Amino acid sequence: MDVNSAKHTVVLRQPRPEDGAALHALIAACPPLDENSMYCNLLQCTHFAATTVVAERDGELVGAISGYLPPASPDTLFIWQVAVSAQARGEGLARRMLNHIVERESCAGVRFMETTVTDDNAASWALFESFAHHWHAPLQRSVMFERSAHFGDSHDTEFLARIGPLQRPATGWSDSARTDEKTRKTA
């Protein structure tokens, strides 16, 4: 492999507490994502690290996806936010990050993925439709949080995208997810 290509490789990994400020900055640089408090981002990097992924290139966070397993639905991975920096867009990074999380040992029992998306967010709909196609799973769409009833007319309606059941590949985890799990266990 060419030295220049290796230098610019994106590494997918679980976040660490030290990533909280960088995650906060990344989300702020990706409008129209809702900015959370930095404390919330620190919780994503600690309490939710097993279901969150960061993408790092040359020591800088260029992507992140936060998710969690709802206590009442441990077979469902809920994707909270997807952020990809401007310099990393168009590389298929978001779908790679989604696959990376789902293929982790911590998500071995996951059969469904859920997220919410506004009607006009074509990029997010394309991402989740592509993910559903890749995992040979249907995508169902329904209203989760309605503009007037839930947001007091201050935010567009959020539609629930439910994907599943996921058809796991017979070969198991990807190399990147296995490497991430081994690194975490030996660290």
Image (tube, grey):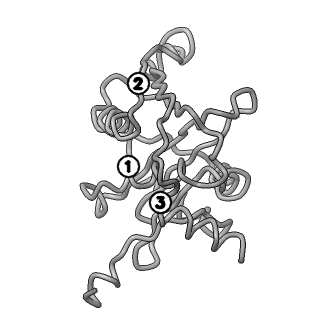
Q: Is the residue under label 2 in contact with that under label 3 (CB below 8 Å)?
A: no
**First reached walking from the N terminus: tag 3 or tag 2:** 2
Find disc 1 in the rendering and name its residue.
Answer: 95
Q: Which residue is rendered at x = 64% and y = 54% of the image?
A: 105
Residue 126 x %, y %: 29, 35
Say which amino acid is labelled 2.
Leu
Q: Secondary structure at mark 3?
A: loop
**Of labels 3 and 2, the one closer to you:** 3
Coordinates of residue 81 in the picture (x, y in percent): 50, 43
User: How many residues crowd around disc 2 within 10 Å: few (fewer than 14), some, or many (20 or more)?
Assistant: many
Question: How far is the residue under mark 3 from the one under mark 2?
Answer: 23 Å
Q: Secondary structure at mark 1?
A: helix
Circle on res. 139: 2
Residue 117 in the image: x percent, y percent?
A: 42, 29
Amino acid found under the numbered disc labelled 1: Arg
User: Which residue position is annotated with label 3?
Assistant: 174
In the rendered image, which quarter is residue 89 located in? bottom left
Q: Are marks 1 and 3 in contact (CB under 8 Å)?
A: no
Q: Between 171 and 33, which is closer to the camera in this rendering?
A: 171
Q: Residues within 10 Å of mark 1 (few under 14, many from 20)?
A: some
Number of numbered markers: 3
Say which element carries label 2.
Answer: strand
| Left or right of 106 in this view: 71 | right
**Tag 3 or tag 1, which sits nearer the N-term?**
1
At x 45%, y 46%, the residue is 169
Q: Quadrant of the C terminus?
A: bottom right
Q: Which mark is residue 36?
A: none
Above-or-below relation of 3 to 158 = below
Give me the residue at 53% from left, 52% from top. Answer: 103
